[in-house]
Amino acid sequence: MNGFHQSFLATAAWFSSCGLPGWLGLVLAGVVFYAVPLFAVVLPIAGLGQIFERKIAAAMQRRIGPSTTGIVGILRLTVNLALPWKAKAECNRLAERLVAFGPVALLDRLLTRTGVAQLAADGVKMIGKEDLVPSGVDGWLFRAAPYLAIAGAFLPFVVVPWSQHLVGADLSIGLVWVAAAGGLTAVAILLAGWGSNNKWTMLGGMRAVAQIVSYEIPVGLCMAAVAMWCGTLSLQQMVAAQYHPGVLSFLGWNLIQSPFMVILAGTFYLAAIAECQRTPFDTAEAESELVSGFNTEMSGLRWGMFAMAEYTETFLIGALFAVLFLGGYQSPVGEQWILSLPPLAETVIHVAIMTAKCLVAIWVMMWIRWTLPRFRIDQVMRLAWLKLVPLALVCLFGLALTMLLGARIEQVAYGRLLSAPSAQLPLIAWALSWLLAGGAIIALVVAAKRSGPPMPAALRRLTTAPARKA
Amino acid sequence: MSRQPLDAAQIHALVVERFPAVTLERSENAQPWLKAPADGFLDLARFLKDDPRLAYDSLMCLSGVDLATFNLPPAKPVPPPKPGAAPVPPKPAEPIKPVEPSLACVYLLHSLVHRHRLMVKVLVDRNAGVVPSVESVWGVAGYFEREIFDLLGVGFAGHHDLRRIMTPEDWTGHPLRKDYVYPTRYNGVELRRAGQRFEDGPYAGNAP
Amino acid sequence: MTVEAYTVDGDLMTLNMGPHHPSTHGVLRLVLEVDGEVVVSCRPDLGYLHRSIEKIGEFLEYPQFVPYTDRVDYVCAMNSNHAYCLAVEQLLGSVAGSEVKIPERAEWLRILFAELNRISSHLVAVGAFAMDMGAFTPFLHGIGLRELVNDIFEKTCGARLTYNYITIGGVAADLHAGAEAEILAFCDTCEREMVRFNRLITANSIFKGRLAGVAAVSAADAVSYGLVGPNLRASGVDFDLRRDEPYGFYSRVQFEVPVGGAFAGARGRVGDSYDRFVLRCIEILESVRIVRQCLEQMPKSAAKADDPVGGWQVDANKQLRKPPRGEVYCRVENPRGETGYHVVSDGSRKPYRIKIRTGSFTAMSIFEKLVPGLMISDVVAVIGSFDIVVPEIDR
């Protein structure tokens, strides 16, 4: 890590020695050393997220999904370009013979069936589309919006740790940076909505801003609670704080430290889905109500940038959820052993684990998206202000109380407190708190079910399986 | 309330007490209907709906019929052109001389209380014929009336929003009239060759 | 649920919903005046799909018009065929001694296919409605089930959408070989899958929350504004033409007529959007019942070997029969409610006037009254819950 950073500084110094101003040298070196690798990691993942989503949606809807585009076209193009002196037909024949060759055929089938080849085709199509700027739009805002959306989606990744050594910049105010940079998305959507000079986009933009601003609060409260618990705002240190020696590393994860943490995790997850405008909170895009919401007038690459920003954001939420609640890049078992590996092996394993955690979080998000209908905008706002904000506040105070008690009575303390860093939870107290919390939740749910009116007979009949005929 | 449906004569007897101008008629296939004058039709409609013995609470259908050619003898079928003979240009259609009143508004009523039906017809002149609107009695009548206004050109007095509904607002003529001449151009778009009538289109030579 | 204690404040924005909007189910245009998200007034603008089918009918012979009835409502073409053919048969038979005789098997086939088409039409209705509410998956599950119906139709009559199957005097063709087994298998699949469908979307609490109490229509309004079929019954009016004015062989089958009952729970009201949705889900299952009974009661072979399923009505000279002068109004229960054909005959081989009364057209008349006060998202719910099919409005 240090070596990497030193090469970055050296490059910046080299740029300066070439006569560039110092700040420009730093920026250029930053692009080469940080931005390009970041994009190289995140961009394909965002693209794969799209294919992932299409495949998941297809499975839930009893379709096959993208399954026909292969690599023959790319091979033809490549052969034609590589052998310009040969006739086109001959090149095509060659490409087809190549694709029939065992390993290539296997690769072709793999890329076809998984739909990955479709991704390339879609990308080329999107880039090749006409750059359409409708008349009457506010040109500057309309053009700037996609870039801001991309920036808002990618900038938070700067502080997300992928392993002990792989992190863009381990800022001491990491969480604040995530919240601040992520806020750019709201601006982007508002600009797109307003700048498109279209009533539907404006409605979408207004909805989006109202919604994002509202859901920033529960998200912020959840982040604050976790920061308080771990005693740091740096994401890298937050991961480190969840380290638990021994075989069962997952015992250190924030999620299972306290019942409040579970509620906070749920709140964070819901609010984060709402912040990145996915079903059931996709009121800003709401294709059946607002045509396509804020990006109605966007087409081609502009639309593609918004789509990419959306998938990157889902990825970001997965990463944040992992860092805040699931121990970040740490393995659920045997983390101690992984840490003792050489840095390269450790990094590879940790990146894989982190990606897997992200994918699980994204998968749940997609599961929700393809199952549930959409809330109305007033219901969305009601959910934020009347349910999630109070819930997050209660949990924040509950967590604070736990820490206070833990600091006072050292034996009952659980969690890792800065004041009592070595205090470990006695097993009985830990189990007792979970039992109490679980019992309370079950009691509440049962009470809520009892108090409501019974399900009408017609509905009950609709949702029970027909009796088997003899 | 009895479910015994009334027959047409009984219904007419009830109606004629208050509206002596209403007569009971029969179509040639023995379908009975009431013929009502346009004047005071709104009162008749209210009576039909509100009288507990009739209680026609739903307007099943309101259709407009142009009777201009209903009583004319059917046109002679055009003989198929002989092979080799020069095509005979179709004769220009003679202008239709309808017998007034030639437009009929047919109100088809149904009572959900008594489960009986009634057909009421109001006949009006084709030029400036006006029927009182009954949308205050049956809410659905508003749209039916707009359709008849648009396609047959019957006016409805007291309608809150009498505009064309199927054709564009700047359309000319009333397409469902029997003497309708299909426009050749609309807003610069060529529709049919000049002078060609709707009847002379792809269905020419298929006369009854 | 509308916005509480709401007053119009400031300028209004005119919003054109349609004619090319994803959830106006075709080319329907609603001119909305909105104050923020709340609709202040709604003015439907119809006619974008007006094809003058009624005028075209005046230039065609009676049987030639049957394919046009397919196009009046292409989601349930079979039912439209049925309505028109019944009207013409009534007209032909309105003089004593000239009744149209339809083979028994053909009568069974008519209601069998009418009910299958009702199932497929309702599947599109509930699926598309769920999609309007943002749930895409139920739509494809519904469409997937509808494919099975389409396959059966395709094998019997050769078409998947516009069937031209029911003819004046019978039906166009007998069932294909093995159809009974296929239809029974479909019935089982449909009942099984509908449980999944209802668990997925009907019982979903977000879905209920979206629709509970939205755009409730009182029984009096529903009758006055000419709502028909499931929309009328959702408002609590117990009226179904199949039961109350039975045509064909509907008097020989048993089925229940569901009526709206504030299914959405505490916040639901009789006649709200959710009731209209649930009613269609129930009707699908009732139609499955009718289909089963048809297959049980249908005579296995036709009475007359050379004319198993009826056909065009011809006289002794093999000329098409001309109906007598006169008129008839015949109405049947379609998936979108009462469809009436008012046919006037001047004694020639062509109808003098055909007036088609459709459920979607009359449902549009209540929009101006119902929509103001709702939010934009609810307008979509209203369109979907009334199961608007635009060609049926414009004809």
Image: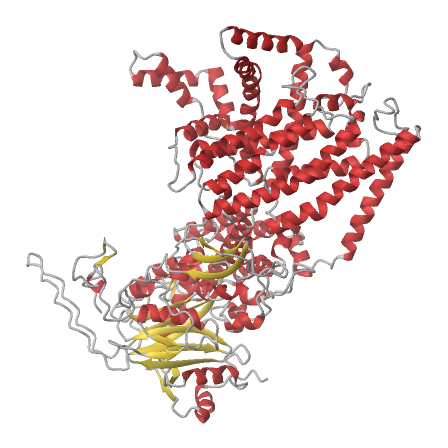
From what the image shows, is residue A248 above or below residue C81?
above
Total number of numbered discs in the rendering: 0
Q: Quadrant of residue B73?
A: bottom left
Of C109 and A169, the residue lying toward us: A169
Give the image location of residue B26, x and y in percent: 36, 84
Q: Quadrant of the C terminus of chain A?
A: bottom right
Q: How is the image coloured?
A: secondary structure
As drawn, is C278 to the left or to the right of B44?
right
Of C383 and A238, the residue lying toward us: A238
Give the image location of residue A268, x and y in percent: 70, 37
Of B65 and B172, the residue lying toward us: B172
Does residue A66 appear in this view? no
From what the image shows, is residue C94 above or below residue C151?
below
At x 48% / y 77%, what residue is drawn? B137
Q: Quadrant of the N terminus of chain A?
A: top right
Give the image location of residue B197, x and y in percent: 20, 63
As drawn, is A16 to the left or to the right of C351?
right
Instruction: Tell which residue pokes out farthest to the left in this image.
Output: B85
At x 36% / y 15%, what residue is drawn? A81
From what the image shows, is residue B188 above or below residue B37?
above
Give the image location of residue B69, x and y in percent: 24, 76
As drawn, is A275 to the left or to the right of B171?
right
Does residue A365 appear in this view? yes
